[in-house]
Image (spheres, rainbow, N blue to C red):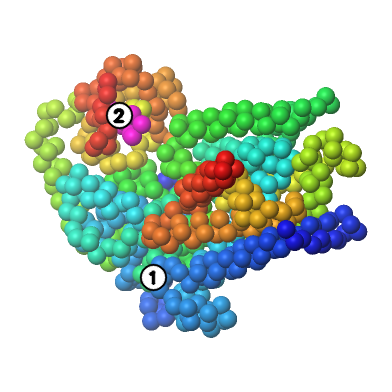
Amino acid sequence: MKPPLHTSVIALLAFSAPAFGQDLTTIKDDMDRTVEIPSNPQTVVITGGEELVAMLTSIGYVPAGMAWGYQSDVRQTMEGIGGDVGDLSEMAIVGETGDLDYEAIAALGPDLILDWCWQDGKLDKLPQIAPTVCFNPRFNTFGLDAAAGGERYAKQRVIAGLVGLEDALDEQIGTYEALLADVTARHADVLPDLEWTFLDTGDDFIPHMYDGVKYYTYSYHAVMQDLGLKESDAMNTATRTAFGYDHDDGYAQVSLELVPEYAADPIFVGRYDDAPLGDL
Amino acid sequence: MSTTTLEGFGGRLALRVPYRAVLVSLCLTVAIIGVLTWSLMTGSYPLDGAQVWATLFGDPPSDTASTVVWEFRFPRTLVAFIVGAFLAFSGAALQYVARNPLADPSLVGVSQGAALVVVSVTILAPGMGYYLRPILAFGGSLVVAALILLASSSQRGGETLRFILMGIGVAALISSITSALLTYGDIDRAMSALGWLAGSVHSVGWDEVRWLTVTAIFVVPAFMAAARPLSAIRFGEDVATGLGIRVRMARWGLIILAVALAATAVAAVGPLGFVGLIAPHLARRLAHSGVGMHLVLTGLTGALLVGLADFAGRAAFAPIQIPAGLVTAIIGVPVFVALILRTQARSQL
């Protein structure tokens, strides 16, 4: 079971000790593992988690390698939120995130590996190559730490700290918050009264409605929170009881026939580029 | 054809050995050693033959080289060979017992039972942990196979046909439930389960090698000792009874052994399709022989098939790793069809 978010905040236990010519730092990761990592890692490989790659590239750090299947997604993710992808051409592909080429990772000589760790079995192999830090896959929503009572951007600060780019992250956060303030000010008469709902069609075109409280998958929810919009009732409660199958993971499959009952001021629809909207 | 007969266990084990079969089994053994060597020498991490050799004999050029050879390449190659042999043995035994050339471990619900339990746990109770997966898969396989066996057993005969029909029906039902779980389950967990369902040895290690080897030590000799009853059963129940075989007991004993081998293999690497079906037929076409020698050839063929499939899947499109289960299906099935068609063409001539 993935650790609950409020207990999964990475704790920097911070001690430094010289070994093999490198200063080492001990951290406790989201899987409750204590990992000794270099204080200033030179070669980082990301074996799962497009958001990890997106976040690092957006603050100017290009990892040495990443799992296949994510490069285009990173570009798409970053372009979708208006970020700068940077040059990813130097980044090696080390297999698909569920079927990694462990030898390709070893060939890069990493001194740090970052992973979501939700694919089973990885943790038997990756630590044999380099210190491996696991992140809870749900960390990426900017607002989530704050919603769970934690420090805003806590995870992002830890990740940026791993590669010594805290300043770049601060600059990025500053840009985001300035943009947020501008939008909020310009639409102050509308935003507080808006209710929103989000439907994700996925690739099978079974609409999913995400529970506002447990919503985690993308960043939309955090942006909506930051703008001061309210989630519709359906987002928070009704989906889990009346509208369909409860996945107990924050979302439900919903019926197209009931779409009118999801009424909100805006209904956002997430879909893949080539997925049909069908009857929605 | 020139033959000789090997006997052991007080005459209970008798192998009639055609020389061609011996020659083919030697060739298969050499091929397996060749694939092992090739597999140890090849990979995304650059190591030449001398470095691999030095690593194997305790003088690795680096710690990473040692990890790559001893922790990544060696165990997965060995596991591929062993599970290939297990599935092939299992398929051959089931084909003999059921007297049906289409029988294989999936027919008795081994793959489906394992899949249902693993997918259920992965999706509904992920907290139960990855490390329990082999035990759960093994348990699921045995339970489903036992259900099929119990449901198809009868005092009035016709068990073999009922066994096959029951197996097909139950397997279809279980597959539907598994599909439903994958469709409605959390996407992350469903993806994790799908990775296992594809049948891959990429994450195995020495633990799997150890318990597969222990299983082989206990079960494979029992299989070889069963060559005589298998020889009799393939001619039908009446003939076997006339030859002094306690048919009912022998049949269930062999089915249980076949299920145990297949369940152990599936528990280690997930369902590897077609190996249990194809390997006995390939072996038969490589060399005609008695049941005992055919079992040996089948085991070697299965080992070579999965060993090659894993190597091809690992190296052909590196760093993309193609699960061995997909490669056995992609390569094995066309080869199988070609062999069948060639045999038909010959018989027509």
Residue A248 placed where, x, y %?
A: 46, 32
Three-letter residue code for mark 1 = Ala
Of residues A58 and B211, the one nearer the viewer is B211
Residue B158 placed where, x, y %?
A: 77, 27
In the image, residue B343 sits, relative to residue A206, either above or below, namely below
Q: Magenta residues, as a range?
A: A197-205
Outermost residue toward the front in this view? B349
**A186 inside magenta stretch:** no
Of residues B85 and A83, the one nearer the viewer is B85
Kindly identify the residue that appears in the image at 64 percent across and 62 percent down.
B24
Residue carrying label 1: A107
Q: Is residue A139 left or right of residue B34?
A: left
Of residues A161 and B206, the one nearer the viewer is B206
Secondary structure found at label 1: helix
The circle on residue A274 is: none
In the image, residue B239 sits, relative to residue A263, either above or below, namely below
Three-letter residue code for mark 2 = Leu
- The chain letter for the residue carrying disc 1 is A
The circle on residue A199 is: 2
Kindly identify the residue that appears in the image at 27 percent across and 20 percent down.
A279
Categorize mark 2 by other alpha carbons within 10 Å: few (<14), some (14-19), many (20+). Answer: many
- The chain letter for the residue carrying disc 2 is A
Residue B93 placed where, x, y %?
A: 71, 45
Q: Is residue A124 left or right of residue B84?
A: left
Kindly identify the residue that appears in the image at 66 percent across and 45 percent down.
B91
Q: Are marks 1 and 2 on the same chain?
A: yes
Kindly identify the residue that appears in the image at 86 percent across and 61 percent down.
B8
Q: Distance between the residues labelled 1 and 2?
A: 42 Å
Indicate the quadrant containing the N terminus of chain B: top left, top right, bottom left or bottom right.
bottom right
Q: Is residue A225 left or right of residue B342?
A: left
Secondary structure found at label 2: strand
